[in-house]
Each structure stands twice: as C-alpha cells, then as structure tokens.
Amino acid sequence: MRITTWNVNGLRAALRKGFAEHLDAIAPDVLLLQEVRALPEQLPDAWQQPDGWHVLWNPAQKKGYAGTAIWSRHPIESHAIGLTKADHDPEGRLVTATVAGVTLGCVYLPSGSSGEHRQVEKEAWMKRFKPWADRQRKLDAPFLFGGDLNIAHTERDIFYAKGNANTSGFLPHEREWLGKVFASGWRDLVREDYDTLLGDAGEHHADVVARFGVEGEGIDPAKHGPYSWWSNRGSARHNNRGWRIDYLLANAPAAERFRQSHIHRAAGLACSDHAPVSVDLDV
C-alpha cells in the first residue's frame, strides 16, 4: 500500500498546475493532503468527490486557509477529527482514518513564519500534539502519521542551516521537540531508508537521485537532503536549496511493514512549493 503526503499549497491552484497527472504517476493508495485551502463545494465538481476515492475533508473554518483531507482507494473503516473528541479543530489541522487495518493521521502543524503571534500558536499546538502522538505510538496496531510539520530536524534537513538558525522552523527548541518525538519511538521512515541506501552510495547513487531527487550543483547526498520544500525566493527551487519538513512517521507495528520511500520532486516543482512524500507498506 502506497501512502503519500502532500502539502498542495491550495488544491484549486494545484489542479490547474497538473495535480491530476502527477497523482496518476505517483499512484498512491492513500493520499494525505495539507493546506487544501478550500471547502469541498469550492472545488470543480469532479473533485468534490473524486471518482475512485473515498474522501474525508477537514477544511478550516476560515475560507481559503489551511485544511486537511484523506483520500483512500480502500474503504475508510473509521475516522476522527482533531486531537481529542472535544477538539473542533477550527483550522483543519488533523484528520485520522483507518484503512485496510492501518490507521493514518494527516497533520498540518502551524507555521510560525508570519509573526510572533503565529509562533506562539505553533508552540501551543506542539505542546498539545505530543500527548496525542504518544497515545498513537503505543497502539498495538499499525499507526502512521504524515504531513507538513513545519520543522526541519537536523542540519541535513536544510541547505542553509547556519543562515536559518534563528528562523521559525529551525529554531533550537523546535528541533529539540521534534527530536523528542523521534526518541519516544516514532520511526522517521524516509530518513532511515535514505541513510540505508546512502550507505553504499557508490553503487546506489542513481537510486538516491531517482527516489529522493537529491541532485544539483553543490549538493552532497551525504550532507544535504533529501528535501521536500523549497522557497520561491531566489533560485532555491531550481538549485535544490530546500528544507525537509514533510514527514511520514510510523509506530513499531507500522515500521515492521515498511518497504521503501520516495520524494517526488518533479510533482512539487510543478504543482506546489512542497513535494509529495511516499512510503510503501506491506498490508
């Protein structure tokens, strides 16, 4: 089963930029969408309930803002919105669904880049999110959550590490928080897979490029990337000077089913500022 997470930076805009063609090429069984920025009724008729998909929408109350969704080729067995039963999730930050015996969380953690007030909101959400993540990690059944966490964990996850040391998304306490999420037992499937493949880079260099898009002038696969988001400023997108802020994290039962991962850089360059990220699981 292929699970793909993708911050589409506005689904209506992505549809105009070739979203459908890239979706067909990636061929996910489950699609976790963030920053949908639309109510279902605002989408073209064919995409309000896409043919062949079972769809859960969790739009933000504010029109044109945030929002998440889960699309599945398989029937959705159960679902939930928000971090708790009492959480109405007005910004559409979290939706979960169980599909083919695997429970999936689609997460869009707030960004703090637009000002101090949003950084405060981001950190409040992080504080609430960690207990939710701890509960899911302890489940005996496979659980995987993915999405845009708006934090690059280490210097390998951001090209300009020193220049962004005081930038929201790479602040020391944000990185420490994400490190605690990993240390608690969540498996960073993309990083583990990438490093395993990189272990014999001479033999598998072409696979590193093909599966993760880690290439370009000045890019050393041992030091840089893989990346999943690129600024629209300067030549960051063209030169592959990015950040890795989109993750797919698995608890132990889900990690046992893991096969391989991909970052689809071409789809990101065409449709969004984020690339889709996929993992393949045995189910």
Image (cartoon, rainbow, N blue to C red):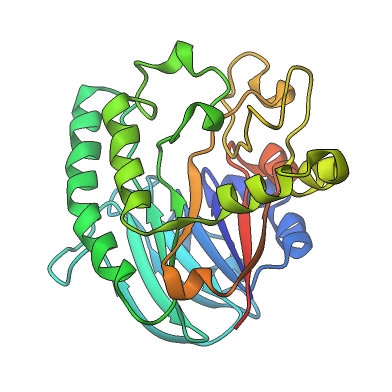
Q: Quadrant of residue 222?
A: top right
Q: Quadrant of residue 279?
A: bottom right
Residue 37 % position (x, y): 44, 49
Residue 99 % position (x, y): 49, 82
Residue for point 71% across, 32% down: 221
Residue 78 sits above or below residue 35 on the image? below
Residue lying farthest to the front in this orientation: 200
The N terminus: image quadrant: bottom right
Residue for point 34% across, 42% down: 178
* Left-right relation of 221 to 107: right
Residue 177 sits above or below residue 56 on the image? above
Residue 111 % position (x, y): 34, 35
* Left-right relation of 59 to 198: left
Residue for point 69% across, 26% down: 240
The C terminus: image quadrant: bottom right
Residue 170 sits above or below residue 4 on the image? above
The answer to whether residue 39 of the structure is visible from this angle is no
The answer to whether residue 202 of the structure is visible from this angle is yes
Residue 267 sits above or below residue 164 on the image? below
* Left-right relation of 112 to 244: left
